[in-house]
Image: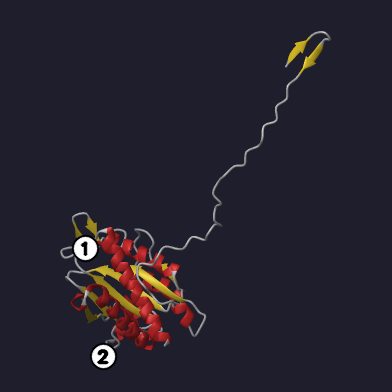
């Protein structure tokens, strides 16, 4: 802008600047993120279900509170089995089951309280997890006997394991198969366990005793691997039951 005289006038110069087109990449449409791959390849038993009912699974981490269980150095049974139970319960609730923990924290529960909690949920499966003194995993199953004393028979009663023993045997075979595939045939054995919490639960029921602290270092990786093997056993059980 400037002034001119003769005559007086004001001159304004206006410049038009061509608008340049922005050149950029055309972004592809947003794609839905795929979920991370599972820990192992597993068929979706939900597609093969004859019934729409979701199976309820009760996970019972042994000990708790003042009852520490086995200990070695910084490893305490009540804490290790709780970690594994939580991992397993998370897998269960992400899949085709509904899972509950008898104890979700470091608290003491009697065997009767655990059994009553489990039975109130009407579960298909009850799994109690412990650490043992052997180098392998031991699967304990309840024993039904007619030779027990009257006092013991009272302990064995409720609805009793007797009507669930066939499902328990199916669960036993499924867990044995899963553990064998994951850890080897020599890493699993089977033992009867009479007069235990298993005899008071009204479902397919097993106690899984994991290898001792002398034979296994329970790192996060190992605990995850243990939980995965038990989770695989649940799927095998469902496949056997529905086929």
State the image quarter where residue 82 is shown.
Answer: bottom left
Identified at 29% across, 66% down, the residue is 225
Q: Position of residue 80 (x, y in %)?
A: 28, 61
According to the image, label 2 marks what residue? Answer: 147
Q: Please identify the quadrant where the C terminus is shown.
A: bottom left
Disc 2 and disc 1 in contact, CB within 8 angstroms: no
Residue 124 visible in the snapshot: yes
Q: Which mark is residue 33?
A: none
Identified at 40% across, 81% down, the residue is 238
According to the image, label 1 marks what residue? Answer: 70
Identified at 23% across, 73% down, the residue is 183
Q: Where is residue 95 in the image (x, y as percent from the top left)?
A: 44, 71
- Looking at the rendered structure, the secondary structure element under dot 1 is loop
Q: Please identify the quadrant where the N terminus is shown.
A: top right
Q: Is residue 194 above or below residue 223?
A: below
Work out whether mark 2 precedes mark 1 in sequence or the reverse, and give the earlier one: 1
- Looking at the rendered structure, the secondary structure element under dot 2 is loop
Q: Is residue 174 above or below residue 37?
A: below
Disc 2 packing (10 Å; few <14; some 14–19; many ≥20): few
Which residue is most to the front? 6
Residue 132 or residue 33, whichever sits in front:
33
In three-dimensional space, the C-alpha distance between marks 2 and 1, rounded to whole angstroms, equals 32 Å
Q: Position of residue 66 (x, y in %)?
A: 29, 58
């Amino acid at each position: 802008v400037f002034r001119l005289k003769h005559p007086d006038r004001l001159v304004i110069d206006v410049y038009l600047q061509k608008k340049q087109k922005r050149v950029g990449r055309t972004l592809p449409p947003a794609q839905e993120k795929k979920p991370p791959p599972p820990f192992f390849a597993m068929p979706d038993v939900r597609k093969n279900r004859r019934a729409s009912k979701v199976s309820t699974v009760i996970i019972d981490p042994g000990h708790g509170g003042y009852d520490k269980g086995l200990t070695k150095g910084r490893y305490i049974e009540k804490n290790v089995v709780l970690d594994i139970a939580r991992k397993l319960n998370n897998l269960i609730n992400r899949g085709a089951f509904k899972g509950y923990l008898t104890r979700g924290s470091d608290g003491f529960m009697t065997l009767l309280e655990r059994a009553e909690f489990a039975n109130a949920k009407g579960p298909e499966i009850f799994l109690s997890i412990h650490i043992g003194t052997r180098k392998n995993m031991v699967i304990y199953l309840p024993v039904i006997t007619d030779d027990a004393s009257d006092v013991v028979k009272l302990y064995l009663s409720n609805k009793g394991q007797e009507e669930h023993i066939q499902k328990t045997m199916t669960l036993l075979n499924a867990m044995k198969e899963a553990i064998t595939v994951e850890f080897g045939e020599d890493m699993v054995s089977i033992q009867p366990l009479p007069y235990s919490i298993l005899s008071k639960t009204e479902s397919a029921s097993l106690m899984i005793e994991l290898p001792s602290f002398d034979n296994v270092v329970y790192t996060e990786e190992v605990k995850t691997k243990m939980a995965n093997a038990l989770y695989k056993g649940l799927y095998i059980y469902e496949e056997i039951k529905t086929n």
